[in-house]
Image (cartoon, rainbow, N blue to C red):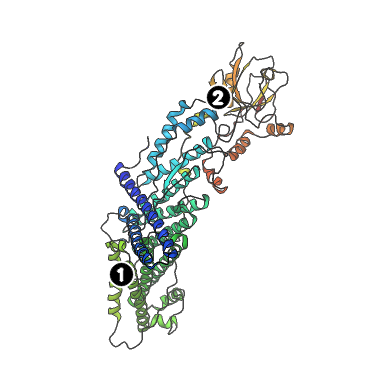
Amino acid sequence: SQQGCDPFAQTQRSKLQHRRARINQQINKEMRMRAGAENLFRATSNHKVKETVALELSYVNSNLQLLKEELEELNSSMDVYQNESESISVPMIPLGLKETKELDLLVPLKDFISEHYGEEGVLFEKEIKEFMELRQAMRTPSRNEAGLELLMEYYNQLYFLDSRFFPPTKTLGVFFHWYDSLTGVPSHQRALAFEKGSVLFNLGALHTQIGARQDRASLPGLNQAINAFQKAAGAFNYLKENFSNAPSLDMSAASLTMLVRLMVAQVQECVFEKMTLLRAQNDFLARLQLAQEAARVEEVYSLVHQTMSQPHVKDYVPFSWTTMVQVKSEHFKALSHYFAAIALCDCPAPSDAELLEQEKAFLQFHVTMPEGPSLRVLLQDLEERRKLGKAHLKKAIMKHEEAMRIHGLCKILRKMDILQEVLSFAHKRSLSKYSEIDHEEDFFETGEAPDIHPKTHQKPEIKSPNFSQVKVTDLFHRLGPLSVFSAKNKWYPARRVHLMRGENGFGFTLRGDSPVLIAGVIPGGCAAEAGLKEGDYIISVNGKDCKWSKHAEVVQLLKSTGKEGVDIGVITLQGSECPKAVDRKAAVMSSGSGMVKSNKENSRKSLMNSKSSSTLLVWSKKSKRSKKSTYSGVPFTAVGDNEAMY
């Protein structure tokens, strides 16, 4: 059976969840009190009352502030997910998993099996329990590949649950309860799409935790972090494109857009770190490239910050996230100016052979041209290079200071020593470089350095989840092939028919397999006499279940009957009775596989919007209808490419 991760982690996380939910209840209570007090304040003209109410309002407001800070601290426990390595890496932002309540499907599914499928529900208890165990395990996935596979396995299994038990017109009557990953606010819906979407969200969140745990001081660790954040972006993006109307804020389009951008920015930051590891940094062109990479990181974090400041997102995103993103944006802007200065001041003037290449790179380096001499002169004149380098350092130092100032505004970030260390190290490095190139006899006013043009050598990819990598088998396989035995199809109660064989066989034509279809009934023949109809599916022969049987197996069972005849169990789909003559001809002409295809397309229904139907394509079961249909020893007339008369 499936294993989630250790129970200790589960209790830690559920404690976190309960605290989140509790704080939210308190916040809601205070908000109601505040609304009441504000109304009273506006309504009264009595000064004494006004004073009392004003006092109460200030009390409520400070209470709200404290509660929001407490919630904030819970959501920013990033250290839980960071790696334990000694080396300094800037912390990344991981997401907590959405929690869910336990779900008991035993009774609803057993009832549906007996009502809809006409089978005894009690015979499927093992399968239902297996499904529930898988759901239980998926609540606490381990933070590794096995945990990701567990979530995907459950997600894929939901496709079968959907097809088997969720008819397009009615719900199963069970509620799926999930908590918002940031606020802990509970939501519930009957739609299975909410369950699917929440699992998809957790797939993305788990990728963020795996990404944040990597040791980014090594190349393999960096590549794994890049991969994890790209896959997280892919999961959130897929969720945004295929599910709408989610009842919880973390799955709203605005939040998901923000999360996708945040993940892309974290990838871009890793790409910058990768370059600092790989490149020989004393080379002029490599330093220009680093400056442009840093400018690109700054640009994507600025975009994230804008997205986090939008109306529907602003009050929802933890303040520490918004601050962290803003700090990184300033920090990388400072780094872009620092590397520009280093390229200018620490590299020798180019030789004639290098000049053309350096000039070409430098032409596209600044957003606007620096004031002063032409680039060619500038590159060859060490004094001019020092001047421009000094201007870049001045800007770098301003930005470092701004990053540290913003960092200091957030109580939670102030506790993160690592970030503090990174910022002050970069600041000191720029300061010491400045004092090194600053000459006492400098009388020129240091100019304004133009910004660096953002450019990256590795664009982040948004990697959609690949559900087909985790193969699952339909737990409810015994109910029969999905092409017929699905929630959307209805059929009349199964009929038992006793057939004797006449001199011309049984008098019907059969087609396809799993289940075998009676494609035609000869008027006046044995089959017609016994009441078999064209379009009936054979589900048993002499008590042996034939729902999944191949064409040849059913024919073999029929052939082996003696004088006493044979008992055949059949069902008729509702709405499939008496096809018109034209349809009959078309059915004869079509090959069996075509029939399954159309069946499969119909069985794909979406609960939320038409878009999500395409997402289920990956799960379609390949069940080609067999072409084998003529058998020696049984009299038949060829009536199509894969039908035979028996």
Q: Against 474, is 544 above or below?
A: above
The amino acid type of the residue labelled 2 equals: Cys
Q: Which mark is residue 93?
A: none
Spot occupied by residue 235 in the image (x, y as percentages of width and height): 46, 51
Indicate the secondary structure of the residue bearing disc 2.
Answer: loop
Residue 209 shows in this picture:
yes
Left or right, 217 with reference to 464: left
Instruction: Point out the residue furthest to the left here.
Output: 86
Spot occupied by residue 325 in the image (x, y as percentages of width and height): 38, 64
**For mark 2, does the 10 Å Cα neighbourhood hold few (<14), some (14 to 19), or many (20 or more) residues?**
many
Tell me the quadrant of the picture where the N terminus can be found: top left
Spot occupied by residue 262 in the image (x, y as percentages of width and height): 42, 59
Disc tally is: 2
Choose between 303 and 367: the one closer to the eye: 303
Please report contact status of discs 2 and 1: CB closer than 8 Å, yes or no: no
Tell me the quadrant of the picture where the C terminus can be found: top right
Residue receiving disc 1: 426
Choose between 595 and 194: the one closer to the eye: 194
Q: Which mark is residue 546?
A: 2
Indicate the secondary structure of the residue bearing disc 1.
Answer: helix
Please identify the quarter of the rendering in which residue 322 is found.
Answer: bottom left
Residue at the location (33% across, 89% down)? 443
Q: CA distance from mark 2 to mark 1?
A: 73 Å
Choose between 372 and 114: the one closer to the eye: 114
Please identify the quarter of the rendering in which residue 57 is found.
Answer: bottom left
Choose between 633 and 597: the one closer to the eye: 597
The amino acid type of the residue labelled 1 equals: Ala
Q: Earlier in the sequence, mark 2 or mark 1?
A: 1
Q: Against 288, is 185 above or below?
A: above
Spot occupied by residue 372 in the image (x, y as percentages of width and height): 42, 85
Q: Against 346, is 616 above or below?
A: above
